[in-house]
């Protein structure tokens, strides 16, 4: 376990980008079967498929459609989503024999993914409290023992998109979830998190980046000055 953590820490402290960091982690962990929740334009999937030779199956889970109950700026008109979907398909077409496109929500996709069949799931979807709860609870059971659950937008303020949109609760919810499952979670650079699905290790928040020492919710809920009334 210590060697595994040290290898991940070395990657986290030397990687130049989010994609570079995850690519190195996936290669180290020999990830073969992965699901990504929230594919958007497909850039992340394309990078992983191009740089991680161990991948044999890449499930791309995204409804690519306007959702009636999602108050986030990425909730575009369906005509826009058609263009976004086509872009995602085009940039991953080189790996069409490995990709498994699931154009639906996580709740709709979950029954078609066998329990403990994934080496890794990467969550970059809804991000609201409702969304991250559904994504993490449904995808965690799909990951094999010892596998990985990673995610994006693990920010230290919930106001990722300002007060006109629902707060982003990836952090601290991912930490609470890891504690409930009694597994360790790593705070990574580039606003990323990584959960190791191994309850024998117990819960611990491991810091491979700065800024996650004080995560009281009242602090995270404070509106940044740039969003306050009259701010220029």
Image (cartoon, rainbow, N blue to C red):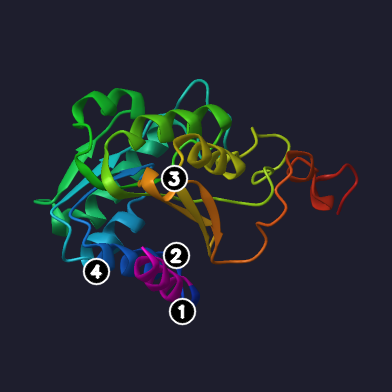
Task: Determine the CA span between mark 3 and mark 2.
Answer: 23 Å
Q: Earlier in the sequence, mark 3 or mark 1?
A: 1
Q: Where does the magenta region start and end?
A: 1-12
Q: Earlier in the sequence, mark 3 or mark 2?
A: 2
Please state which of residues 74 and 5 is positioned toward the viewer in this rendering.
5
Is 54 situated above or below 183? below
Secondary structure of residue under mark 4: helix
Task: Determine the CA span between mark 4 and mark 2.
Answer: 13 Å
Task: Determine the CA span between mark 3 and mark 4.
Answer: 28 Å
Principal secondary structure, stretch drawn in magenta: helix
- Find disc 1 in the rendering and name its residue: 14
- Find disc 3 in the rendering and name its residue: 183
The answer to whether any part of residue 40 appears in the image is no
Q: Residues within 10 Å of mark 3 (few under 14, many from 20)?
A: many
Question: In the rendered image, which quarter contains the N terminus?
Answer: bottom left
Q: Earlier in the sequence, mark 3 or mark 4?
A: 4
Task: Determine the CA span between mark 1 and mark 4.
Answer: 17 Å
Secondary structure of residue under mark 3: loop
- Find disc 2 in the rendering and name its residue: 18
Secondary structure of residue under mark 2: helix
Secondary structure of residue under mark 1: helix
State the count of labels: 4
The answer to whether any part of residue 53 appears in the image is yes
Q: Are marks 1 and 4 in contact (CB under 8 Å)?
A: no
Q: Earlier in the sequence, mark 1 or mark 4?
A: 1
Task: Determine the CA span between mark 2 and mark 1.
Answer: 11 Å
Please tell me which residue is depicted at 25% across the width and 57% down the height of the picture. Answer: 91
- Find disc 4 in the rendering and name its residue: 51
Q: Quadrant of residue 140?
A: top left
Of the two numbered discs 1 and 4 in the rendering, the one whose residue sits closer to the viewer: 1
């Amino acid at each position: 376990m210590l060697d595994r953590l040290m290898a991940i820490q070395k990657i986290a402290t030397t990687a130049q980008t989010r994609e570079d960091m995850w690519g190195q982690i996936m290669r180290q962990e020999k990830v073969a079967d992965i699901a990504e929740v929230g594919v958007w334009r497909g850039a992340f999937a394309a990078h992983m498929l191009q740089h991680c030779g161990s991948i044999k199956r890449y499930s791309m889970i995204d409804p690519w459609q306007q959702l009636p109950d999602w108050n986030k700026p990425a909730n575009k008109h369906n005509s826009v989503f058609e263009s976004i979907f086509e872009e995602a398909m085009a940039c991953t077409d080189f790996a069409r024999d490995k990709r498994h496109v699931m154009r639906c929500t996580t709740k709709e996709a979950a029954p078609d993914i066998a329990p403990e069949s994934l080496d890794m799931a990467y969550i970059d979807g809804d991000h609201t409290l409702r969304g991250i709860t559904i994504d993490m609870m449904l995808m965690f059971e799909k990951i094999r023992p010892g596998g990985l659950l990673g995610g994006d937008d693990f920010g230290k303020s919930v106001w990722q998109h300002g007060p006109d949109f629902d707060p982003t609760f990836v952090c601290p919810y991912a930490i609470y979830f890891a504690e409930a499952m009694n597994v360790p979670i790593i705070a990574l650079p580039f606003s990323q998190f990584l959960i190791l699905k191994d309850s024998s290790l117990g819960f611990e928040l491991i810091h491979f980046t700065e800024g996650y020492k004080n995560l009281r919710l009242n602090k995270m809920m404070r509106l940044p000055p740039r969003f306050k009334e009259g701010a220029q």
